[in-house]
Image: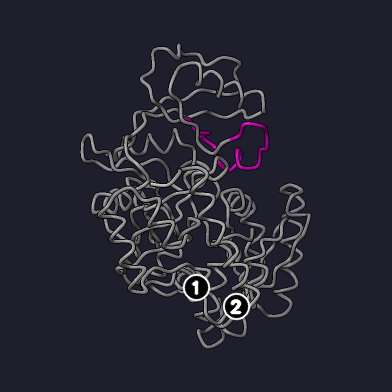
């Protein structure tokens, strides 16, 4: 691509599908580094992002109309940007955005830089059964797992023979995320056979026709969860790593499991295992791994790989490596990337200090997190000083609602 670093501020044009925290994180990082505005396409108005001075936010009903219509919308925007001499980078906020982009990568690359893997690889490793087969091959630990085909009318295995408690979740999160039905939850806790039968029937009747993954429940609270983000270059080498220990995750049924507060912290086993995985499959770009520490054997167990930056990937920027610079240096400028790790002593947070004070049970972890708040090293991606008053107001509204939500679902410590 014929562009120099000096031209980026005039020609770089980021385009993001979806408007929530990752979209704003992209926009913030692009503005911090290159002074550019990010275009966001979304079916809904996420005020904390749409109010930003550095975002061209476009609410378009087409974003809810299916793949063909969305691709046509993106194509039209890409043609216009190319006609203006822009170097457009196309990014997605959610799993289904990335699947759509990857599935149409060959066409979209006519107008956009598309920093995602080819669809065959992406589709392969995001199927949880295939992910666990690769983990077996590489000696990467994961929870004991069973799978059930929801296109069938019955489980196929006597649920009474399984060890409880268990955790159940759809194998194809991108497909499941687009579904809407009463009783839907992101992850289901299963304490007895009757619950498993009910959940299986719920998904089957709703039209979900992929596998339901059922796993051994690993004991531990939110602070046993780990998030790890890697970036791999065009040679398949992992060249950037960041991650941390979850202090608190969301407990509302529709968003359960989404980290809300992460303490930057390196776990050697996670880094080593993730590197082996990425290099084995020939991965390029961002990957995000979810894992949990199993106190029963002292081992981190992997749950899945997300083939995009996770919603909270701004923690890499907080840790010392601006995460969008990796994309631009690699895909736009064609630079060789040096190996870097982003683990500054800091706390990524979407909640205020009083939520940590009242809802984190572990005394040592709570004190450590509160110390970072007091030292000014606890930050949210939404707290971007150059942004305008309207954004700051909506960021305040968003964070101010967190206490009541945690109180509703957890109760005070």
Residue that label 2 marks: 12
Q: Which residue is depicted at the point 44% across and 62% down?
A: 349
Dot 2 crowding, Cα within 10 Å, few <14, some 14–19, many 20+:
many
* Vertical comparison of 354 with 345: above or below: above
Q: Which residue is depicted at the point 33% across and 54% down?
A: 245
Dot 1 crowding, Cα within 10 Å, few <14, some 14–19, many 20+:
some
Q: Is residue 32 magenta?
A: no
* Vertical comparison of 387 with 90: above or below: below
Residue 267 in which image quadrant? bottom left
User: Which is more toward the observer, 105 or 214?
Assistant: 214
Tell me: 3 left or right of 207. Answer: left
Residue at the front extreme, as displayed: 412
User: Which is more toward the observer, 335 or 363?
Assistant: 363
> Spatial distance from mark 2 to mark 1, Cα to Cα?
9 Å
The x and y percentages for residue 219 are 32, 35
Residue at the bottom extreme, as displayed: 6
The span shown in magenta is 168-184
**Callout count:** 2
Residue at the left extreme, as displayed: 297
Residue that label 1 marks: 328
User: Which is more toward the observer, 360 or 173?
Assistant: 360
């Amino acid at each position: 691509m014929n562009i120099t670093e000096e031209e980026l501020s005039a020609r770089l044009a980021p385009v993001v599908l979806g408007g929530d925290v990752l979209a704003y994180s992209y926009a913030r990082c692009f503005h911090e580094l290159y002074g550019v505005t990010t275009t966001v396409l979304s079916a809904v108005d996420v005020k904390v992002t749409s109010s930003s001075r550095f975002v061209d936010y476009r609410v378009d009903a087409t974003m809810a109309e299916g793949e063909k219509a969305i691709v046509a919308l993106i194509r039209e925007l890409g043609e216009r940007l190319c006609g203006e001499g822009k170097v457009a980078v196309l990014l997605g906020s959610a799993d289904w955005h990335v699947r759509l982009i990857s599935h149409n990568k060959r066409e979209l690359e006519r107008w956009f830089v598309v920093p995602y893997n080819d669809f065959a690889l992406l589709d392969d490793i995001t199927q949880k059964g295939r992910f666990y087969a690769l983990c077996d091959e590489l000696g990467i630990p994961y929870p004991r797992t069973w799978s059930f085909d929801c296109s069938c009318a019955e489980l196929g295995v006597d649920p009474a023979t399984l060890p409880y408690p268990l955790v159940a979740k759809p194998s194809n999160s991108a497909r499941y995320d687009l579904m809407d039905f009463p009783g839907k939850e992101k992850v289901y806790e299963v304490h007895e056979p009757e619950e498993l039968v009910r959940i299986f029937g719920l998904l089957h009747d709703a039209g979900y026709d992929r596998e339901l993954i059922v796993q051994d429940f690993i004991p531990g609270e939110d602070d046993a969860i780990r998030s790890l983000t890697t970036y791999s270059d065009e040679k398949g080498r992992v060249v950037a790593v960041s991650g941390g220990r979850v202090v608190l995750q969301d407990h509302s049924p529709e968003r359960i499991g989404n980290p809300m507060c992460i303490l930057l912290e390196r776990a050697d086993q996670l880094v080593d295992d993730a590197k082996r995985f990425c290099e084995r499959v020939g991965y390029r770009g961002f990957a995000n791994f979810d894992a949990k520490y199993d106190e029963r054997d002292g081992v981190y167990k992997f749950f899945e790989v997300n083939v995009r930056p996770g919603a909270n990937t701004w923690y890499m920027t907080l840790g010392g490596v601006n995460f969008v610079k990796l994309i631009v240096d690699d895909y736009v400028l064609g630079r060789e990337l040096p190996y870097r790790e982003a683990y500054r002593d800091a706390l990524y947070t979407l909640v205020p200090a009083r939520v940590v004070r009242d809802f984190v049970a572990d005394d040592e972890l709570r004190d450590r997190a509160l110390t970072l708040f007091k030292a000014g090293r606890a930050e949210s991606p939404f707290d971007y000083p150059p942004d305008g008053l309207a954004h700051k107001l909506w960021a305040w509204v968003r964070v101010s609602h967190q206490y009541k939500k945690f109180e509703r679902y957890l109760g005070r410590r």
